[in-house]
Image: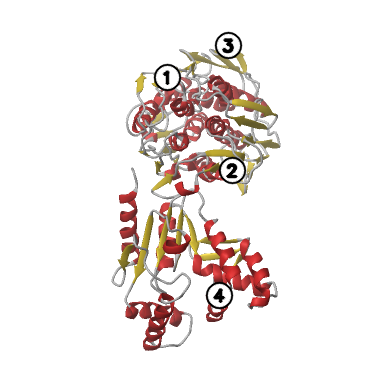
Amino acid sequence: MFATAFLDIPALKGASGTVTLPGSKSISNRVLLLSALCQGTTVVHDLLDSDDTRVMLAALRQLGCGVNVQGTTVTITGLGGQLKHHDAIEFFMGNAGTAMRPLTAALAVLGGDFTLKGVPRMHERPIGDLVDALRLLGCSIDYLGNDGFPPLRIGQPSLKLDAPIQVRGDVSSQFLTALLMALPLAAKTQDIVIEVVGELISKPYIDITLNLLARYGIAVKRGGWQRFTIPQGCSYQSPGTIHVEADASSASYFIALGAVAEGNSSNGSTGDGIRIQGVGADSIQGDIRFIDAAAQMGAKITSGPNWLEIKRGAWPLKGITLDCNHIPDAAMTLAVMALYADGPTTLRNIASWRVKETDRIVAMATECRKLGATVEEGPDWITVHPLQEHQWQSASIHTYDDHRVAMCFSLAAFNADQVPVRIEDPKCVAKTFPDYFEALFSVSHANTQDIPVICIDGPTASGKGTLASHLAQALGYHYLDSGALYRVTAYAALKAQLSLETNDEARIAELARTLPVRFEGETVWLGSEDVSDAIRSEQAGMNASKVSVLPAVRTSLVALQHSFQRLPGLLADGRDMGTVIFPHAPLKVFLTASAAQRAERRHKQLISKGISTTLEILRADLEARDARDSSRSVAPLKAAQDAYQLDNSSLSIEASVEHVLACWQAKRPF
């Protein structure tokens, strides 16, 4: 997951390949609570690992459920409809509506001394209609802040079950879902009837709830979409094992990706288009009907029992007018697809957008306008006009702590004008799809010249490796320590029982061409082996010098270094990154420090490793090495003509990072 302050997505050219989706948030949290209300044990497979599910799991542990997490398989030992803990409990629900609403209803029916609160945005999301319905039932619920909104205090109920329980359906379907999941706990001696007041929005989410209730032994009788009857004497029965479908809402981004991006196999995949694993057209989730809207706009879609394949069809896409009540979450993706259409797209019946993680109508309109689009909006609708070539603008997309805003607008990077897009606070996708951007980049490709590279060159012990790794972490970029590549090559060659001489030059070069090396911070991996310490010895340095003079090895390693230029960008440090390897990099930094300062830094490093030396010896050695490196016939140490020169003799690592970030920001179009 990208935990950076922002993520710059370069202009993307096309996409092809396979994406396996995480589990559905809606199904995951429903299944967790239903499993907790059962007697016995339920094994849940393919559970979504996200902020929202972690909130629910934490709450279930507080209630006394047995919770055993093994990757995406979670074993829940249920409560059998009876609470184990009756002491006052305070639950923190974050911004997880799929946890807050149903848990409120279940706890209110069971009774106790509970406080439920969340992040500030949760305290702005309405819950009054659910509370009103529960109070009519005889539940004890008090507002601890503004009426109609969390936080809430729940006490002991005096249940009254004779009259139908009325709940509004035109604000959020989660209110009805919460009642449907909680009221079987009270239906011991009589039927319980729920009546929906007004039009029920997001009906497909109620279908999910009813489907899952049936899996847990609760057969709700439905009278249209206005009347629901929970039968007398019903009780939750564990299904034993249950699998969570992949998230159909998350599928919408990759369905849209297949529709807007040129298919291409240049990223190593076979064939064109996008294949989505984990969900098919027969999904129980209403948002799967997004495929119909995408097809209406021009996408070519084929489907199997657990997969979808999408290719670009009509181009440009076709502008549509659509009632989106049946796909409220996925419909946001249509607003970005509309930017690629041949005419305006109007999305109607989306009033529920205003009470989600943010006011999504305002958010989508505001951010589309940043990209250059004309947008009109109303109480429950939005119209987005497409952008033509030469109309796209680079934009920094504010994400409002809303995962769907971040994921939607990543698709704007496929624009006709090949301008980049910045996504602010990319970690907000953790709510439902923590690895979304990694999945996006795994199937997307860009022109090489559009993938940014920042080069950090400089003399030995100038701190370039530390600076580069910190910058890579701050920007979410890949990291290349070019000096370590020669050390790793020598290490791998010796491990393969090769000599570091000219007689094995061809074999070492072949080995270097596909060296499975990667850098994570200051850790160096060779395949699954951490070689960080092994390659940093004095002997490893001498071995690196031996292989560095072999021309065929150097040629192989130049190609390997170029392969590190991958989405979303690269931080490369070394001696010749900006002068030889990446001469067209948009930012080159030549980092230096006085020989005295560098000797002091090296002295501290060696002393910490138990290696005895003196400052005088180290300084003389560094000055001699500077002279050798500067006078090399191949790739000598020197600053590129357009390099930003930074003397960090008196700067902390943090200050050096800030200097370079400021320089980089000045070159960005945002």
Residue 19 percent coordinates (x, y) = 61, 40
Count residues near mark 1 (Cα–Cα under 10 Å), then give few for <14, some for 14-19, many for 20+: some
Give the amino acid at mark 3: Gly
Give the amino acid at mark 2: Cys
Give the amino acid at mark 1: Pro
Looking at the image, is 305 positioned above or below residue 649? Answer: above
Q: Which residue is mark 3?
A: 224
Does residue 186 appear anywhere in the picture? no
Give the amino acid at mark 4: Val
Judged from the image, the secondary structure of the residue bearing numbered disc 3 is loop
Does residue 238 appear anywhere in the picture? yes
Mark 4 vs 3, N-terminal side: 3
Give the color scheme: rainbow, by chain, secondary structure or one colour: secondary structure
Residue nearer the viewer, 552 or 619: 552
Q: Which mark is residue 344?
A: 1
**Residue at the image position 43 percent from the left and 58 percent from the top:** 583
Q: Which mark is residue 65?
A: 2
Judged from the image, the secondary structure of the residue bearing numbered disc 2 is loop
